[in-house]
Image (cartoon, rainbow, N blue to C red):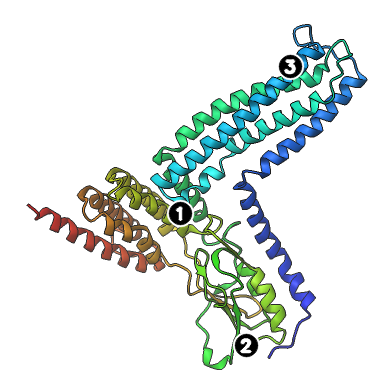
Amino acid sequence: MENSEPDELIEARVAPHIRRLRLRAFRERVRESLLFLPLVMVACAVVIAFVLADLDAKHDVGVSVVFTFSPDVAITLLGTIAGAVITTAGVVFSLLVVSLQLASGQFSPRVLRGFWRDRGGQVLVGLLMSTFVFCVLTLARIDSDQPTAPTLTINFALLLALLSVLAIVVYLDRISRQQYVGRIMQRVSGETRQLIAQLPYGKNLGMKVGEVCALPDFSTLGPPLVVLSPADGWVQQLSRRAIVSATPPNSVIRLETRVGAWVTAGTPIIRIWPAPANATAVSRVVDDALIVGPARTMQQDIDFGLRQLNDIALRALSPAVNDPTTAIEVALNLGSVMRPLLAAPATPQRVRDSSGRILLTPQDLDKGEYVNHAFAQLRHYGSGHPAVLLAIARTLRMLREACVTPSGRLTIDDDAGAVAEIDRLLASVDAELAQLATRP
């Protein structure tokens, strides 16, 4: 065994990478929360209510005769606004639930995250709640014995009511457009291409760990330390730099999972050769370098984008929907996603850092597996639709041309698996089209 490092030294070395990982996870949860932004807006409304009340009490502010109200009129006006916005908030929540049900039933439950992340809906809910809270707080502070109501406070309540009406109109426009399948596919494709643009390393995918190396000889390494998964769930994020930094120099680390894979509690997720002396501390720190959750996300998971597009196509090809045109659009969008993916440099699965640590990631998807995940199911379930098969064939041929130069050489050395998978799928598509052509 290697000499044991102090636990504090290991944690200090890994801490910056863990913080970045958890900060991204927190931002993702906040982005998908229907509660966070509305609560922030409500808190701001409470602060503004007290500030304006203080200004009205200390200064005789008169905007104009038109915008000055008597206390009785102001009380009636604020009560009307408060009642109207709380009723409207219920209607907005109903519209949101209905839109989620329609999207889940028509397309896929996995596309719902786009509706949760919609800033327009979150702002509208926050604006309605803020208007209600502001009006209630203002009602409690109006003095009926004064000749006029607080001018700044009442006019700000009117401004919130006007903004709420405008936000409702904008939200109705947005929610109606978001239900269009083309916009859903555009959003999913765009998120996936943003991750692909970072390959092989980027702010979401992680930093470079080391240089490509040969596979080590495991027979000389001895028994490994096996780190087990503490929970069931999907691997949403992982930090390769944190995992490598937590191990002693000259270690060999093999990841037994990948981003986007399901892990079962008690199963191996990482093996480390040779087993470090402070195995408990290393296991704890390494385990912190993986974020496991109940659902896949687009933080690092390129394959999840392909999964969402496929779900839309498979739902469209089901007998209940029978919409091959949508499946054709999915095939075209998959081509737009896969072309930059095949042109991007792949993340190496064997790297060695400057301290002699070797990181092995055999579970990571190669380009051939990405091609399979993108088109295999679509080809299978679209076999009864010649138009869908033709769209798949044209897309696959376009991708093959992107991988192979006119002289027949591969444009990138690691494209061989992708070309082999494309050829296999093309052979299947051509055979199915020939079979369909012979039918009476």
Q: Nearer the viewer, mark 1 or mark 3?
A: 3
Q: Residue at x 42, y 50 (%)?
A: 108
Between disc 1 and disc 3, whose residue precedes? 3
| 310 w.r.t. 254: above or below | above
Give left or right: position of 174 versus 62: left
Q: Which residue is mark 2?
A: 274
As helix, strand or loop, the secondary structure at mark 1 comes to: helix
Q: Position of residue 97 (x, y in %)?
A: 52, 40
Residue type pointed to by label 1: Gly
Q: Quadrant of residue 19 in the image?
A: bottom right
Where residue 21 sits in the image (x, y, percent)? Answer: 65, 61
Q: Which mark is residue 76?
A: 3
Q: Work out how far the residue at label 1 is from the one at label 2, CA to CA, in angstroms.
A: 37 Å
Residue 128 versus residue 253: which sits nearer the camera?
A: 128
Mark toward the start of the polypeptide (2 vs 3): 3
Q: Quadrant of the N terminus?
A: bottom right
Q: Which mark is residue 347?
A: none
Q: How far across and how far down the image is residue 151, in percent?
A: 81, 16
Sequence-earlier tag: 1 or 2: 2
- Seen from the viewer's position, the closer of residues 153 and 283 is 153
Nearer mark to the viewer, of 2 and 3: 3
Q: Which mark is residue 305?
A: 1
Cβ–Cβ below 8 Å for labels 1 and 3? no
Q: Residues within 10 Å of mark 2 (few under 14, many from 20)?
A: many
Amino acid type assigned to the residue bearing label 3 in the image: Thr
- Please rate how many residues cluster around mark 1, counting C-alpha atoms within 10 Å: few if below 14, some from 14 to 19, many from 20: many
Residue 246 visible in rendering: no
